[in-house]
Amino acid sequence: MKPVAKRATPAAIAVLRQATALFPKRAKASDGLLPSAAHITQSPNSDHNTGFAVDLTHDPARGIDCADLYEKLKEDKRVKYLIFKGQIWIPGRGDKPYTGSNPHNKHLHISIKDNSGNDTSPWFPWIAKPKSTVTSQARLVASKIKPLPKKKEKK
Ligand SMILES: [Zn+2]
């Protein structure tokens, strides 16, 4: 049994923080970093115990589509393995059926490699930061405003 860390690695914390920064209204019900006592008993060798794993809640309506992330994060060199909807992906081994007790239908599990715990570079680099609605509306309005006719100066 691995000793349980006191805090999650910066890389794991960054997944949740960056997801929230991009999609502030996303659901967080299945988010997770460190394990509960029950989880430790059930999964004594989980990467959650060392802080090298993170669970991200599946909420496609509000921007976090874990089916999509599962595919895109295969490109990220920090990933040790991914689990979502009954599938596990391991670099070099591809997708396999996941047979653990929790099929991971409500969250994406990301395990992080031992050498990547402090790497907080963007986890979702293909998602552009949301544009300020105020700015884009202001531009739209500005483009429709005709210049005011010059007033004739009264003498
Ligand atoms: Zn997990």
Image (cartoon, grey):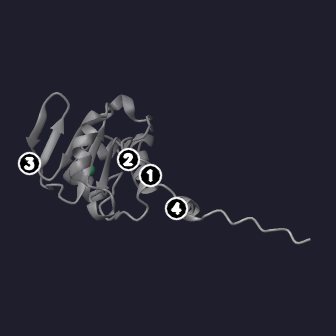
Q: Is residue 147 above or below residue 33?
A: below
Q: What secondary structure is marked by label 1?
A: helix
Front disc: 3 or 4: 4
Q: What secondary structure is marked by label 4?
A: helix
Task: In this rendered view, identify the residue nearer to me: 135 or 13.
Answer: 135
Q: Amino acid at mark 3?
A: Thr
Task: In this rendered view, identify the residue nearer to me: 130 or 53.
Answer: 130
Label located before the other in sequence (4 or 1): 1
Q: Amino acid at mark 2?
A: Ile
Q: Amino acid at mark 1?
A: Arg
Q: Residue furthest front?
A: 155
Q: Residue furthest bottom?
A: 154
The residue at which mark 1 appears reads as 17
Disc 4 crowd, CA 10 A, few/some/many (<14, 14-19, 20+): few
Q: Amino acid at mark 4?
A: Leu
The numbered dot on residue 140 is: 4
Badge 4 vs badge 1, beta-carbon distance below 8 Å = no
Q: Is residue 10 above or below residue 138?
A: above
Distance from mark 1 CB to nearest ligand 1 atom below 8 Å: no
Q: What secondary structure is marked by label 3?
A: loop
> Considering the image in quadrants, where does the C terminus appear?
bottom right
The numbered dot on residue 127 is: 2
Question: Left or right of 7: which side holds 52?
Answer: left
